[in-house]
Image (spheres, rainbow, N blue to C red):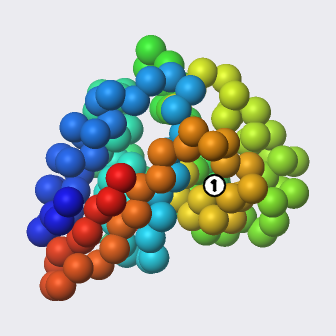
Amino acid sequence: MITLNAQATETFARKWGKTLQPGAIVALHGELGAGKTTFAKGVISELTRTPPQQISSPTFTLMNLYESDFSVYHFDLYRLKSTDDFIHLGFLDFFDNNGICIIEWPEKISSFLPPNTFHVQLQHFDQGGRKIHV
Ligand code: ADP
Ligand code: MG
């Protein structure tokens, strides 16, 4: 999928995210500015009815929780110092509690990602475009 602007990425993420079931884990791969947070916004907004402008990356808190019929955990692990920290913060428990986990910078904890993780790759493509592979 190629999207030409952030709105298109968000719309695509909404449609894709609609089908996610509780317990799902989504790993968003891509460099800084690739559109991971934009994609997460679409999915979280669709699943929890949170207005997209109220959704931002948990850059410093590492995790934001959104509650609806089920919990949605949005991780941004850019500033995670070690995999040990992930455990000590109790984050691993969220992988197994029937919520939905959406993870930016999943490479930081790749060894913890279960085999049924959905992997989404986002890449810059031409000017303003992004290539999204699910
Ligand atoms: P990341 O979380 O991967 O660092 P963000 O989603 O925070 O990326 O930022 C992506 C930036 O790129 C935003 O400023 C967004 O408006 C812009 N952008 C331009 N084109 C696109 C596109 N096709 N998809 C997603 N974002 C885009
Ligand atoms: Mg981000």
Is label 1 in a helix, a strand or a loop?
A: loop
Viewer can see residue 45: no
Residue at 17% across, 65% down: 2
Q: Position of residue 78 (x, y in %)?
A: 61, 68
Instruction: Report the side of 88 relative to 120 (left or right).
Output: right
Instruction: Report the side of 87 relative to 13 (left or right).
Output: right
Q: Position of residue 75 (x, y in %)?
A: 57, 50
Which residue is the extreme one toward the bottom? Answer: 127
Amino acid type for the residue under numbered disc 1: Leu
Residue that badge 1 annotates: 62
- Quadrant containing the N terminus in the rendered view: bottom left
Question: From the viewer's perspective, is residue 118 above or below residue 77?
Answer: above
Residue at 33% across, 36% down: 17
Question: From the viewer's perspective, is residue 127 above or below residue 106?
Answer: below
Q: Nearer the viewer, residue 118 or 48?
A: 118
Q: Position of residue 7 (x, y in %)?
A: 16, 56
Which residue is the extreme one toward the top? Answer: 69
Residue at 84% across, 47% down: 87
Instruction: Report the side of 2 relative to 133 (left or right).
Output: left
Question: From the viewer's perspective, is residue 28 above or below residue 87?
Answer: below
Q: Position of residue 22 (x, y in %)?
A: 50, 22
Viewer can see residue 109: yes
Residue at 66% across, 42% down: 114
